[in-house]
Structures are given as structure tokens and as C-alpha cells.
Image (cartoon, rainbow, N blue to C red):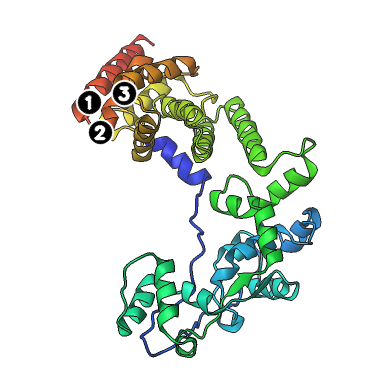
């Protein structure tokens, strides 16, 4: 639904912060030289940014003495050069975690034995596949296979001395202690990428609000339910919908496809409901209907339709649950009938027809369904 998609973009930011190797294009005869600045932004922390020192006072360290931002650094350490004077760091260290000098965090982790300079293999691992293939071509070796195979082939067919000259830049790697820390605190990299809540909030929940000693995934699920209840009580249906979508993605990740199907149906029901984030406001019903007719019809211009990703996820679930079209229709109707909506613009049967038509991109059926619902709403409007 276009309108709810706007809410999704505004309140949920799944930023892709996957570690990226810090390498530059090079020819076969010149070494890599990283020339980015390691300096933090020159402007001071904005008023809405919590200083790291304040966060650390409230946070609980691990049994080995590491705080959440240090755990996250362990996850990214292998992408950073040991030559910190020319190392570039992503902006999220400063803008999301108030870490003004990431290089100092790396130095501290190395000093305490959680990371160490990597070997020649890790230096090559941080190169791009095209760079590695180019090196193999220069020595007349095959360039087929996975990256690990390419690295093995290069190491086996080139002298260490020659490779040291071509790949002099070393990158950090985890020690045994560093690996254990990252393994035991997976909530940090997970929440850094999924953004369901901050790593600091999870640290607080794990250590101060967890009498039953739940794992972080159970606490995330608890958080989802808290958010759902809050949003629906406040009439923030767009935010409620987005939280339920997060729950769908979470369950799908756990391969709980039956439960994921039920939540995706709920998301679709809200996408097609015409409800928004001010459902309990004192908007005149006549004016509300006028807004719906303006923004949700006709189909080609409607905010109340399925986003492409939702269609793709439903098709995926149909395959994973091995549902025929008839079985899918039955399951959809069963789910839509079980969902209580404050207001709706389509009947349950129409919602089923819309989903099925969207899955096959049948615009004619969709135009007909939306025209029928529009006519019904215009009749209601005249009666007011």
C-alpha cells in the first residue's frame, strides 16, 4: 500500500551496513594504498545524539569487559586495514553510535587481545574477485570457481614473497577471544543490520529487564508485541502494520512459514483497509470517505494496494507451503475473516480476489474490483 509504504520508509530504516572491504582498484604491479581519512566529523554531536560516555554508564559489559559498540567493531574488524592512519570508517560509527574515533576502538581491542593483524590470506580475501582473477590470469591459471577456490589457487601457484609485494596491506582478524565474544553476543551485529531496536536498548533489556533470562530473539519478539499493542491502542495503524511486517520477516527468517503466512495476511489486510496513522482522530466521517475516494481509487493511482515486495513474499510462501491456487484462496479467506479491522474498504472475499489477481498481474480484474468498491463507497458518501 503506497501510503503505508511511506510510513515504512519513514519509521523503519533497514540500512545495508554489510561490511565492505576497504580496497582500491589496482594494476598487477602496484600495491594497494588506502588514502581515506580516519578523522571523525568536525561538527560536534548534535543535541539529539547521546554521547558514548553516557551510553557506557548505563550499559553492562560482557564478562570479558566489552561494550556493544566494541562487539560491533569485532564484526567489522576484518574489513579494516592495520594502517589506521589511512583507514576510512563508515559514518554509522559516529551518527548511530557516537563513536568519534573508531581507530582508537580498534587499537584498544588489539591491545586487549581480541583482534590481531591478519595474514597474507586475509589480505587477499579483502580483495575483489576481479582483482584476484586478474592475478591468476597473469600466471596462466584458471579463473573459475568460488572466491575461496581462487585464493587457494593463487596461494598455491605464486611465491609468498611475490604476493607480499602485491598485497602489502594487512587487515585485522579475530583472535580466539574475539571470536568467542562475537559468537556470544550476536544480538549486536543482528540489530545493527535489522534496526528493530538499538543495540543499547537490547543490552539494557538483556541485563535489566530479563527476569526469565530469555535470549535476544525472544526479547525482540516481546518488543514486537509491545509495539503492536501500543500502536493499535493509539490508532497508529500504519505503524502497527509496519511492526507486523517486521514480525513476518522475523518469522520467515526462522523458517516458521505457517505463522509468517498469518502475519503477512494481516499486513495485506491493513494495506487494503484504507486506514492510516490517525485512525482515532476527530476527522469527520464524510471527509474521511472523501479522502479515501481521492487517494485509494482508481486502482492505477491507489494507495490501497499491495507493494511489489508483498506480492513476491506471498508468492514465495505459497511455494514453501505447497499451496495450490484453490488452497491459497481458502487460506487467505480464512485468515482475512479472522482479522478484526476498525474499518475496511474491501470485503474479505474482495481482498482474496485482489491478492490472487496481484499474483498474476491481472490489471483488468483489479480495475473491476476497485471500481466495485469505489461505487459502494460513493453510495455510502451520498447517504451521509
Side of 184 where 2 appears, left or right: left
Q: Are marks 2 and 1 in contact (CB under 8 Å)?
A: yes
Report whether 365 appears left or right of 143: left
Spot occupied by residue 80 in the image (x, y as percentages of width and height)? 56, 73
Q: Can residue 318 be seen in this view?
A: yes
Where is 10 relative to 324, above or below? below
Residue at numbered disc 1: 367
Q: Give the crowd class for mark 3: few <14, some 14-19, many >=20 residues within 10 Å.
A: few
Residue at 45 percent across and 90 percent down: it is: 162
Q: Name the residue under label 3.
A: 324
Is residue 298 something one can see in this rendering? no
Identify the element where label 2 is drawn.
helix
x and y percentages locating residue 107 in the rendered image = 69, 76
Task: Say above or below: 377 vs 309.
Answer: above
Which residue does the image show at 31% across and 74% down from the upper left?
142
> Who's the residue at 66% across and 70% down the image?
100
Q: Name the residue under label 2.
A: 300
| Camera-side residue of 212 and 298 | 212
Label 3 – label 1 distance at C-alpha: 25 Å
Provide residue 279's location: percent of width, then percent of height: 51, 26
Residue 344 is marked as none
Amino acid at each position: 500500500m503506497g501510503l503505508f509504504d511511506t510510513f515504512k520508509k519513514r519509521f523503519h530504516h533497514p540500512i545495508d551496513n554489510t561490511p565492505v572491504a576497504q580496497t582500491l582498484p589496482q594494476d598487477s604491479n602496484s600495491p594497494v594504498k588506502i588514502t581515506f581519512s580516519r578523522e571523525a566529523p568536525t561538527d560536534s554531536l548534535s543535541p539529539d545524539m547521546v554521547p558514548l560516555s553516557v551510553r557506557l554508564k548505563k550499559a553492562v559489559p560482557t564478562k570479558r569487559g566489552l561494550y556493544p559498540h566494541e562487539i560491533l567493531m569485532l564484526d567489522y574488524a576484518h574489513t579494516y586495514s592495520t594502517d589506521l592512519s589511512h583507514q576510512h570508517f563508515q559514518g554509522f560509527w559516529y551518527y548511530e553510535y557516537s563513536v568519534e574515533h573508531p581507530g582508537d576502538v580498534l587499537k584498544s581491542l588489539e591491545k586487549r587481545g581480541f583482534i590481531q593483524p591478519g595474514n597474507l590470506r586475509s589480505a587477499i580475501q579483502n580483495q575483489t574477485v576481479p582483482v584476484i582473477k586478474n592475478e591468476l590470469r597473469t600466471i596462466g591459471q584458471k579463473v573459475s570457481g568460488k572466491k575461496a577456490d581462487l585464493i587457494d589457487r593463487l596461494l598455491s601457484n605464486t611465491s609468498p614473497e611475490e604476493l607480499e609485494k602485491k598485497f602489502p596491506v594487512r587487515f585485522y582478524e579475530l583472535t580466539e577471544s574475539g571470536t568467542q565474544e562475537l559468537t556470544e553476543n550476536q544480538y549486536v551485529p543482528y540489530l545493527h543490520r535489522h534496526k528493530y531496536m538499538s543495540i543499547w536498548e537490547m543490552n539494557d533489556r538483556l541485563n535489566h529487564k530479563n527476569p526469565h533470562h530469555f535470549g535476544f530473539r525472544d526479547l525482540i519478539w516481546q518488543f514486537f508485541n509491545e509495539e503492536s499493542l501500543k500502536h493499535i491502542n493509539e490508532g497508529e495503524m500504519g505503524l502497527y502494520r509496519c511492526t507486523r511486517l517486521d514480525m513476518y520477516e522475523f518469522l520467515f527468517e526462522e523458517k516458521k512459514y505457517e505463522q509468517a503466512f498469518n502475519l503477512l495476511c494481516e499486513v495485506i489486510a491493513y494495506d487494503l483497509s484504507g486506514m492510516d496513522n490517525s485512525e482515532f482522530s476527530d476527522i469527520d466521517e464524510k471527509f474521511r470517505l472523501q479522502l479515501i475516494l481521492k487517494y485509494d481509487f482508481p486502482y492505477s493511482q491507489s494507495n490501497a494496494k499491495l507493494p511489489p515486495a508483498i506480492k513476491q513474499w506471498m508468492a514465495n510462501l505459497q511455494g514453501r507451503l505447497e499451496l495450490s491456487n484453490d488452497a491459497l484462496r481458502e487460506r487467505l479467506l480464512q485468515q482475512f475473516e479472522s482479522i478484526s479491522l476498525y474499518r475496511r474498504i474491501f470485503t474479505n472475499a474482495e481482498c482474496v480476489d485482489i491478492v490472487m489477481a496481484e499474483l498474476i498481474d491481472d490489471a483488468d480484474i483489479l480495475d473491476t474490483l476497485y471500481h466495485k468498491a469505489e461505487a459502494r463507497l460513493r453510495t455510502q458518501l451520498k447517504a451521509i
